[in-house]
Structure formats: structure tokens, C-alpha cells
Amino acid sequence: MVVPGIYVQEQQYNLNSLKIDNRCLSGFAGITECGPINTPVKIRSFDEYLKVFGGFDTAGILPCSIYNYFRCGGKECVVVRIADEKTAACAKLKIKQNRGKIEFEASSPGHWGNYISASIWKEDEKYFSVSLTYQAKTENFIHLSCDKNDERYIVTYINARSSLCKVKVKGFATVPAPVFMRNFSSGNDGIADLKAGNYIGYYNGLNDYAGIGCFESFDDISLIAVPDICWLKKPEDMQSVQMALIAQAERFPNRFAILDVPEQLDIIGAANWVKRMTSSFAAAYYPFIDITDPLDRTGIGTIRVPPSGAICGCIAATDGEKGVFCAPANCLIDGAVGLSNSLTIGEQEILYTSRINFLKYFPGRGVKIWGAKTLSCEKEWEQINVRRTFSRVCKALKEGTRWAVFEPNDKNLRKRLVRQVYGFLLNLWHDGYFAGSTPEQGFYVRCNEEINPPENIDAGILTFEVGLAIIHPVEFFKIVLTAEKDGASVYLQE
């Protein structure tokens, strides 16, 4: 289009775009060794996690939870580092000479930076070299200059290449005096006085978020967990964080919260813990699990961790291998060798009737997830797979029928909608998503004059109705979607 004028461009909408996405992206928030604070980072392997957030040398549980997540079948997750930004500090090293100063600052806040050491040696009257060492990692930068006009100016050269630190220079025009293995100092993790608010955070837009509020910038996160609530000292703070997780899951219907019942609670305490938490968008698990210590080369040592990381990994694996309609239960937790609390049959019954999914140890086989209940008190929503299947179908219907907003509101449109949605649900029925020996027993689709009276058509409103029999053939869940002609929106009413 090089000549001025009015051009018409037709946009085609794919009527076969309805599909279930069985990928499972999990969101974790907690304490890490290093890395950016309150910044969500998508991680696709545990090795990638180690590069961004460091290893197991931290007071938090999160590294072990991420390790369990990938070990149990998780493919990708979003990680948010929790810390008090007011007290967290980057370790620094200041080199002063005459009136000038070179300042090295660790790439992220935390005590880890105190173990970075720097060495400087002179090459000639203009150039020098810098060596940075952290654990087994060494970064060498040679032929550096303090001249801003030099292509190897220390600030721009190191800052563009180092993963350990950033450099600032003030009033420094000469070659610095030699330094040998001098350590950074004053690094602080910012976790000594963590409060519930540090975990809960906020979301004020795409560039203004903190805590679990960071997850709200991702539409595709389906599981959320905070394994490190055990770091909080007050039980009411722990519950506040878990209630915030549930609230977020309910605001994002395709999201589901995985909760750890605190380790110190006995069976009655665990049952009382979840009494206030009544939601079909969350599930609680008990007790903690003993896993093989990732740092113990003998394979004998164990550590105790909350189960949420492993649970999310098992759910992600089930989604990918079988489908979201399959209950995430009877799954073996890879690497788990025991439990913090051996449960009797009577204790198992108390937990199950309290809507808590318990973990069960089988001698010679390992630890399995023994239950797939939500925290809902409503019978139709008491199974995790039912809630998540319904949410996933609703999401697919909402996204896959947006094209109808741009179409004339007539019989032809209604027929096209029914044909598209029926074909989508029929495929799901064949895949085992719905109950019934015939499609009619598993689902129905309605979009006729009865639910689309003339006054609605004149107002530009189109409604179609879908029923799903996820568990029993006679139990249907009703979905009503409404499209308005004045805006490209599809509204969902459960």
C-alpha cells in the first residue's frame, strides 16, 4: 500500500480453533539464594533455576520444591523471589585511590554476594585486569581501562559481560593499585523479618507488582504454590498467604492453588487449619515428605520438605500424559522416601473427611498422592479434576468463540456456533473428558430462539448454552456465554 487511499483487509477466523491446552505452567514464590526480587522469571529446567536463583545454600525451601517439581514431571514454571526490599542488600567492594573510587556490586541482593572475591593487577600505565571468583566460577577481564572513551572501559565492558556483579566508577582516571582476593561485604538476604505482606504483595499493572501478585501478569499459569510459608512465624500470617493464593485462583478461573498444611500440626490441627478455607479452586496436602538430599552424593541422606513442589510436578505430568480430566492421585512422588508423620487408618479418615489430601507411604514402592479433593464443601466441586476440567473447557470456549462477536446475529451464526462447539465437545468426549456411553449423555449444546429472544437479538446479544457431565451422566454443569456486538468481548457466567 504505497498510494494514499482506503483499503479493505478481510480477517479470517478459524472455526476449528477450539482446543484444550494440557500444558501446565506452575507459579512458585519463595526464598532463594540469589536472583531478582519480586520479578517473575520463567524457568524451563532445574539447571536454569540454578543459573538465575542459585542453589540450595539458602534458608528457604523453594530450591528443593523446584527440584521436586522438575523431578516429578514439571516442564516449566514461573519463579518469584520473596524478600524484604527495604533490608535486602547487594554485597559490595569499594576500591578507593586518591579521590577516586571503583565500586563492585553483586548482581542481586543477598548474603551470597559476600563470597565473591576480586583481584586486580596492573598491566602497564594505562591498562589493568580484573578477576572475579564465586565458588567454582571465575570471570577474568583483561586489558581494562578507566578511560570512558576506551572500548575496554571497565564499566561498560564488565557490566555487559559479568553475571556476578556490576561496576561503577567515580573520579578514577588512573590504573588502580593491585588487589588480591578481596571479598565483597554487606550483602543481606532480607528475610529476617518477613511478613505476610511480603508474600502476598500486590498487582498494580504490568510493571508494578510484588509477591504472588507477580503471577497476575501471566494468563497461562494454572497452578500456584508458596512452599516457604513455613518461614513465617505466626500461624495467622501463614493462613493469610494461603487465603491470598485461593483468592487469586478464584479471580483467574483457570488457576488452582496447591496448599501445604504446616508441618508442626497434628491431625486435629490439620483438620482445623482448613476449616476457613472453602474453595473449589484449591487443594491442601499433608504431611511433609522426606526426599533424598540432592547434595548428598551417597544417596543416603534425606531432607524434609513441604509436598507442594512435588504435587505440582505430578499434576503437570498427569495433564501432559493423560489430560486434565484425570485425577492427580495415586501418583508416585519420585525421590520421596518417607513422611514426616506416619498416618493410621483412623487419621487418614479424619484428613479425608476434612477435605485434606494425604500422602501415603508404601514399603518398597515409595510415597504416593492419596486423594484428589478440593477444599470445596459442595459435592459437585469436590474433585480436583472436575474443577480443573470445567475451568479448562470454559477457557477454551471463551477464547475460541470470540470470532462470533464480529458476525451478524442471525440463525446462520447460531448454527455455526453449535457446529463448532459440538465438534469440540465431541472430540473431548471421545478422549474421555465426559461421562456417558453416548455423546448425548456426556454433553449438550443449545443455541436457539428460546434462549435468544428477539429483544436480545435486537440488542446485539447472543447466548449459547453448554452442559457437561464430567462425573455422573445425569449431573450437568451449565455454562452460559454472552457476546455483545458493541465490544469484542465474550462474558462467561457459570
Image: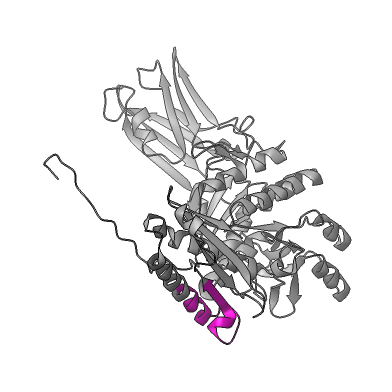
Identity of the residue furthest to the top in this view:
99
Asked where in the image residue 470 lies, by quadrant, the reply is bottom right
Q: Nearer the viewer, residue 311 or 131?
A: 311
Identity of the residue furthest to the front in this view:
454
Q: Nearer the viewer, residue 252 or 213?
A: 252
Identity of the residue furthest to the bottom in this view:
437
- The verdict on residue 436 being magenta is yes
What x and y, as percent, mark residue 339?
76, 67
Q: Looking at the figure, which quarter contains the C terminus?
A: bottom right
Q: Nearer the viewer, residue 391 or 98?
A: 391
- The verdict on residue 341 being magenta is no
Query: Residue, x 26% and y 25% (percent of image)?
Result: 150
What x and y, as percent, mark residue 74?
54, 64
Q: Is residue 320 left or right of residue 126?
A: right
Q: Is residue 160 left or right of residue 313?
A: left
In the rendered image, the vertical position of residue 207 relative to residue 10, given as above or below: above
What x and y, as percent, mark residue 4?
14, 39
Query: Residue, x 61% and y 59% (percent of image)?
Result: 295
Asked where in the image residue 125 lies, by quadrant, the reply is top left
What x and y, as percent, mark residue 106?
50, 35
How many badges with numbers are in the image?
0
Q: Which residues are magenta?
A: 424-445
Query: Residue, x 78% and y 65% (percent of image)?
Result: 355
Q: Is residue 377 visible?
A: yes
